[in-house]
Image (cartoon, helix red, strand yellow):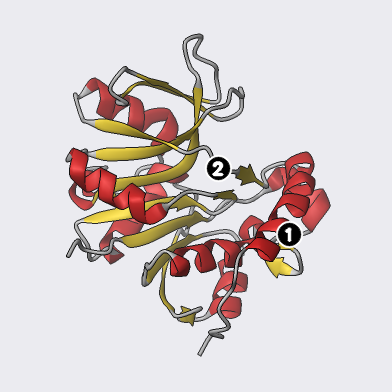
Amino acid sequence: MPEIPDVVILAGGFGLRLRGTIGDVPKPMAQIAGRPFLELLLRQLKRHGFSRVILSVGYKQEVIREHFGQKAFGLELVYSIETSPLGTGGALREAARHIRTETALVMNGDSYTDVDLSRLGREHAANDADVTVVVIPENRVDAGSVVLDSKGKIKAFAEKRHIPESRYLSAGVYILGKLLIAGVPEGSKISLEEQLFPQWLADGKSIEGFVCEGRCLDIGTPERYEKAQRALEQVELETYIESEGRS
């Protein structure tokens, strides 16, 4: 039976663009349908059979820790605390000391994607990839542009700029090997999307694209937060949520 990966949720951002909308709270705690956004991600992980989640937190981390504690919705929660901003790659490297499994599922704490996370894990293992990136068929200049080859491997990745031949965007959901993460210099401020992915491609790492046709919503700007409010309320209605509490 395949190993169930630990999960790392990158939830340490300042959320400056949302400050006028949600106030002085961590971005993953922005309210959706009366609940913190982060709750949607945790319940999604529970539905797909994950059991252990590492929350990479920084700004106002005490708000997140006080709300969720050490267990939520049947998930074990572990906290990796950034004492200074390290970027997505640096934060992931900091969290690596808590990862117990050979691979880790990594998610951004400000986006929700309707993706079959269980199938993602199976395909990553079947492809024997170093990294698998969930991609969506869309073009937008403020997200990671991705170019796939005819076999579904990623051959180019550019963060927050458009590649002319790109037909896909990164959804901010990845599976990576723990050893690959551990190879990032400890304590470095580095971006997973802007620096590490292009470097790994240049080094010949096998990076697969996992195409997802489902909804992909983020709350990074007031406009997208407003859109996500409506769409994610519908997710709440469509999905049966088990009442497990936080005991």
* The furthest residue to the top: 164
Of the numbered discs 2 and 1, the one sitting upstream in the chain is: 2
Horizontally, residue 181 falls left or right of residue 56, namely: left
Residue bearing mark 2: 214
The part of the image, by quadrant, that contains residue 56 is bottom left
Question: Counting other residues with Cα less than 10 Å from the Cα at mark 2, is it few (<14), some (14-19), or many (20 or more)?
Answer: few
Query: Which quadrant of the figure contains the N terminus?
Result: bottom left
128 over 2 or under it: above or below: above
Q: Is residue 187 visible?
A: no
Measuring from the top left, give residue 242's x and y in whole percent: 55, 78
Horizontally, residue 201 falls left or right of residue 61, namely: left
The part of the image, by quadrant, that contains residue 218 is top right
Measuring from the top left, give residue 213's x and y in whole percent: 52, 37
Type of amino acid at the residue the image marks with label 1: Glu
Question: Residue placed at 59% from the left, 73% from the top?
Answer: 241
Residue bearing mark 1: 233
Question: Residue placed at 54% from the left, 61% from the top?
Answer: 41
Q: Is residue 198 visible?
A: yes
Type of amino acid at the residue the image marks with label 2: Gly
The part of the image, by quadrant, that contains residue 36 is bottom right
Horizontally, residue 165 falls left or right of residue 64, namely: left
Q: Of helix, strand and loop, which one carries label 1?
A: helix
* The furthest residue to the right: 20
191 or 113, nearer to the observer: 113
204 over 172 or under it: above or below: above
Question: Residue placed at 51% from the left, 81% from the top?
Answer: 69
238 over 130 or under it: above or below: below
23 or 130, nearer to the observer: 130
